[in-house]
Image (cartoon, rainbow, N blue to C red):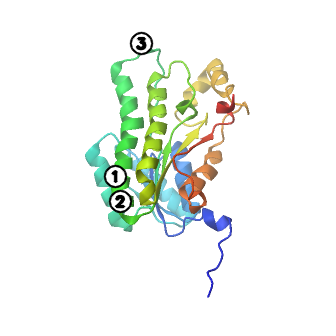
Amino acid sequence: MSETKRTVLDLFRLDEQVAMVVGGSRGLGREMARALAEAGAATVICSRAREACEAAAAEIARATGRDSEAVPMDVTREEDVERAFAAAVERFGRLDVLINSAGINARHLIEDCPAETFHDVIETNLTGCWLTCRAAARVMKPRGHGSVVNVGSALSTVALPMRTPYCASKFGVVGLTQVLALEWAESGVRCNALCPGPFLTEMNKPLLDDPAKTKAVVGQTALNRWGEMHEITGAAVFLASPASTYVTGASLYVDGGWTAR
């Protein structure tokens, strides 16, 4: 008997898969976690804030009917990362998808930027991503399957003034992603970067208090507007799902045309 042919929409399904979303308690991370659950995945929601983590997991489970587990994790703490991955595997028995969406920002001219601030951004955005990728490799490579999606930024390839910590970290995320795509290729584990432009997340809402700063950011895009939160979800599901099995080492920009300029 021949196998039933899957349709193109079937390729975007994540049924019976388990997806961990780091930074999944708010903002784009939460939007992506809910989208993965809508596509059929059980989700593991990770962030530093236990209550926010639990609230996000409960809301996603309620809205989608899929299992969703809250696992608090501080990505800057190696032991925290290892514990969280162990807890996820113990709970679900597998891990198929990792989305690294934890991130912070800081806006300073370099001469006014405290070294501590620079280190904090690098530790969260880049070192944390490295730690979770390492933990994912140890789970996914033996199984010969997995998709890791590291969240970069439009500022992974272009620059803005007053963003030395953030740009340094996000340029690094793309470099890390490309190296891991090469390291993992033979194992069947893929690694890609998803690079958003200006979405009106909690990180960017302070810009609304200054119309000139808002215009300076949104005006960089060809579409000349903020991204709506749901507009990140299709790209996230694509990179997580079997629809992208020949895609690795890529950077997918969802930036309203910022990097086209």
Residue at point 54%, 68% (across, down): 15
User: Looking at the picture, how far across and down is residue 17, in whole percent?
Assistant: 48, 66
User: Looking at the picture, how far across and down is residue 180, in whole percent?
Assistant: 42, 47
The amino acid pointed to by label 2 is Val
Q: Could you tell me if residue 73 is visible in this image?
A: no
Badge 2 marks a residue whose secondary structure is helix
Which residue matches tag 3?
Answer: 112
Which residue matches tag 2?
Answer: 139
Q: Gap in Å between the C-alphas at discs 1 and 2?
A: 7 Å
Depth order, front residue of 133/47: 133
Asked whether the beta carbons under mark 1 and mark 2 sit within 8 Å of each other, the answer is yes
Question: Which image quarter holds the N terminus?
Answer: bottom right
First reached walking from the N terminus: tag 3 or tag 1: 3
Badge 1 marks a residue whose secondary structure is helix
Residue 158 occupies quadrant: top right
Direction top: furthest residue: 111
The amino acid pointed to by label 3 is Asp
The amino acid pointed to by label 1 is Ala
Q: Could you tell me if residue 132 is visible in this image?
A: yes
First reached walking from the N terminus: tag 2 or tag 3: 3
Mark 2 surroundings: few (<14), some (14-19) or many (≥20) residues within 10 A: some
Which residue matches tag 1?
Answer: 135
